[in-house]
Amino acid sequence: MIDYPRRGGPTVLRILLGSQLRRLREASGISTEQAGYEIRGSHSKISRMELGRVGFKERDVADLLTLYGVHDAAERAPLLELAREANTPGWWHRYGDVLPAWFETYLGLEEAASLLRCYEVQFVPGLLQTEDYARAVVRLGHPDATDEEVERRVRVRTTRHERFTAPGAPTLWAVLDEGVLRRPLGGREVMRGQIEHLIEMAELPNVTLQVVPFGAGGQAAAGGPFTILRFAEPGLSDVVYLEQLTSALYLDKPTDIDTYMRTMNNLCITAARPDLTVRLLREILQEG
């Protein structure tokens, strides 16, 4: 029996189940059209299921397993159980009123990731933000939000931070453009508190923080910020996350992953060494 991970909520479980169903379908020589017909759906529905982009009905999974020739109860049971668990809401579900569906997908991936590498050019990464800084970012992006909505969005960010002090904490490697640190978002005092927090975070064993100084000139990622998520589970491939104003892109093709990984490595070479980060942050505090 396959031991599927239970961290990351429904997002990761759907991806794992989808990949297993795709493997079984391809091994049996059945097309997405044939599979879609079997569950009274379309080939595009099968594609979405296999990518983990939609929820699973246990009946549909059972019918597909039968179609793919999986009749042994011992083989069917863990996949049917996975289908049930994949529909269990993650902790972020209770914030669904203030979170877009495309970001909920990211939260599930972030929850399951063992390594996150990110590059930011405008804001401090969400995982490294103080409450006051996060509040300023939320108000900037949602100027019409009520105070309650703002606080709920801030709570999502602080909940994400809790993983860094919990057992099995992930590794975070963040590269920031110097402009992020020079932009007094929320005012000078809020920014001072944020930089002090970055100093504390940079000293954690699972956090690496680098800064690309203004003097470095052109950067390899002039196109904008991105995050690469890596997972310990062998059934999950790396994912590149690109956030936009009203949506997000999730890239998992090997060619895309390789391109962004090279870009990230180049940024790490261009940026100041990690052991110089705390000194730079303290210099910025003294200037303020």
Image: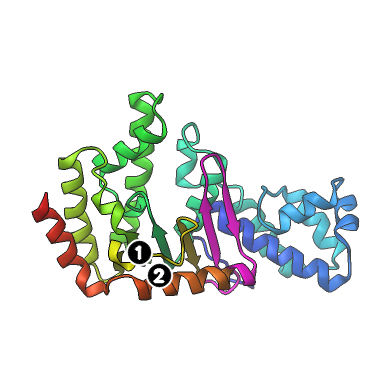
Q: Magenta stretch: residue 285 in it?
A: no
Determine whether the residue tagged by mark 1 lies in a helix, strand or loop: strand
Counting residues from the start of the chain, the first of labels 2 and 1 encountered is 1
Estimate the x, y position of residue 256 in percent, counting from the top left: 60, 67
Question: In percent of the image, x 32 and y 70: which residue is there?
Answer: 271
- Residue placed farthest to the left in the image? 286
Mark carried by residue 267: 2
* Residue range (magenta): 233-256
Count residues near mark 2 (Cα–Cα under 10 Å), then give few for <14, some for 14-19, many for 20+.
Answer: many
Q: Would you identify the image quadrant in which residue 120 lies?
A: bottom left
Estimate the x, y position of residue 163 in percent, counting from the top left: 34, 58
User: Would you say 198 lies left or right of 177 here?
Assistant: left
Q: Nearer the viewer, residue 91 or 226?
A: 226
Residue that carries the numbered disc 1 in the rendered image: 175
User: Would you say 260 lies left or right of 25 here?
Assistant: left
Let me know if residue 89 appears in the view. Answer: no
User: Would you say 131 lies left or right of 280 here?
Assistant: right
Compared with residue 47, is residue 156 higher up or lower down, i.e. above or below? above
Three-letter amino acid code at the position of disc 1: Val
Compared with residue 48, is residue 209 higher up or lower down, i.e. above or below? below
Q: Which color mode does the image show?
A: rainbow
Estimate the x, y position of residue 21 in percent, counting from the top left: 74, 63
Q: Given contact means CB atoms under 8 Å apart, are the residues at marks 2 and 1 in contact? A: yes
Q: Nearer the viewer, residue 207 or 141?
A: 141
